[in-house]
Amino acid sequence: MSAVKIADNIYWVGAVDFDSREFHGYEIPYGTTYNAYLIVDEKITLIDTVKEKFSNTLIQNISEIVDPARIDYVLANHVEPDHSGGLDSILDIAKAAQLITCSNGEKGLRAYYHQDWNFKIVKSGDILNTGRYNLEFIQTPMVHWPDNMMVYLEDTQMLFSNDAFGQHYASKERFDFEVDEKITLERAKDYYANIVLPFDAPVKKIFADLEGKDISMILPSHGLILKNTLTKILGKYKDWSDNITNENEAVIVYDSMWGSTKEMAEKIAEDFEKKGIQTKTFYLKEHHVSEIMSHIIEAKYICVGSSTLNRQMLPNVAAFLTYMKGLAPKNRIGLAFGSYGWSGESIKYVNEELEECKFEMMEPIKRQYKN
């Protein structure tokens, strides 16, 4: 895709990846984007790059606006290669450019690329003047790596938010107002549930750091630029970082060998519904764990069921619990359930895993065969 004008002197010059379907074990059925932004001023500034395979796209998009050799500053807000993969190509062309990043960013980029680039280190509160514009750096460590950083452009009230407030969503549109609002909100929810959820304390710090700053537009590193949905997504991030859940929502996740655990899942769902609690049930042979997390993020009750196989829980259930534990949802109520033939260890192990999540636990439910 070609470069897109966002405002006077500010352009999207990134790449759209319609083909990717996986990111850190998180299923991304709608693809993704690698958003890079160009500010044309007395000093020409590039904010982030793209995944390495899209480096030529980045260079072509920049070339539609200026000669890439004229770039003065390249801002590396994140080490991860879907953000930094184009650095080598850009800095090979813009040989005089300074590479601006935080201390952890320099450490990570040196370790990953083994290049002695022209680094300039910044910290929160530092200002980069490009002529007309002043860019303020805001370090956001552990949203979601130690090196993450945002950039605030006060003149236009734009927040270049890096990995916060993004979505894995590929489309020809660049702005949220060009698509159905529901799409932006759902993809932002998927993104938070599968990437940002473990980092609630650092997310809360973002809001403290942004206090007093007017924001008219959020320009994330992935997905659509936020304008119409900005207020709603900021509100959702506050709720999600506080682990605010819906008391009337339950998620049931299970795998079953001969159908008995499936019957238990259906009966548990029926009992929840009788109490007015909306329930979503996921059979692990049919649903990916990342899809399930997008529902867990707002559900109060997390129920996990497994048959017993070789004195263990079923492998799909073990994988789901490992994935969920890493994402660390808090303030939930857990329930372990399952069927067994002669030993029944799976229910005990599922219960222990849910306890490790520090959920408030209900009494486990065991069922022998079909009794």
Image: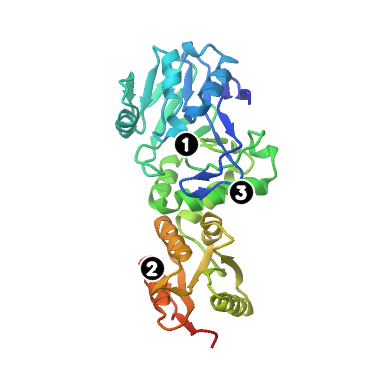
Mark 1 or mark 2: which is in front?
Answer: 2
Q: Say which element carries label 1.
A: strand
Residue 310 in the image: above or below residue 329: below
Amino acid residing under circle 3: Leu
Mark 2 or mark 3: which is in front?
Answer: 2
Which residue in the structure is indicated by mark 2? 353
Residue found at the very far bottom of the displayed protein: 371
Amino acid residing under circle 2: Glu
> Which one is in front, 261 or 198?
261
Residue found at the very far front of the displayed protein: 310
Q: Position of residue 283 (x, y in %)?
A: 57, 66
Q: Say which element carries label 2.
A: helix
Q: Position of residue 33 (x, y in %)?
A: 56, 35
> Which one is in front, 281 or 228?
281
Q: Along the polypeptide, which appears first: circle 2 or circle 3?
A: 3
Amino acid residing under circle 1: Asn
Which residue in the structure is indicated by mark 1? 162
Q: Along the polypeptide, which appears first: circle 3 or circle 1?
A: 1
Q: Which mark is residue 185?
A: 3
Circle 3 residues within 10 Å: few <14, some 14–19, many ≥20: some
> Horizontally, is 331 left or right of 217 in the view?
left
Query: What residue is at 41 percent from the left and 28 percent from the top?
Result: 76
Q: Position of residue 38 (x, y in %)?
A: 52, 22
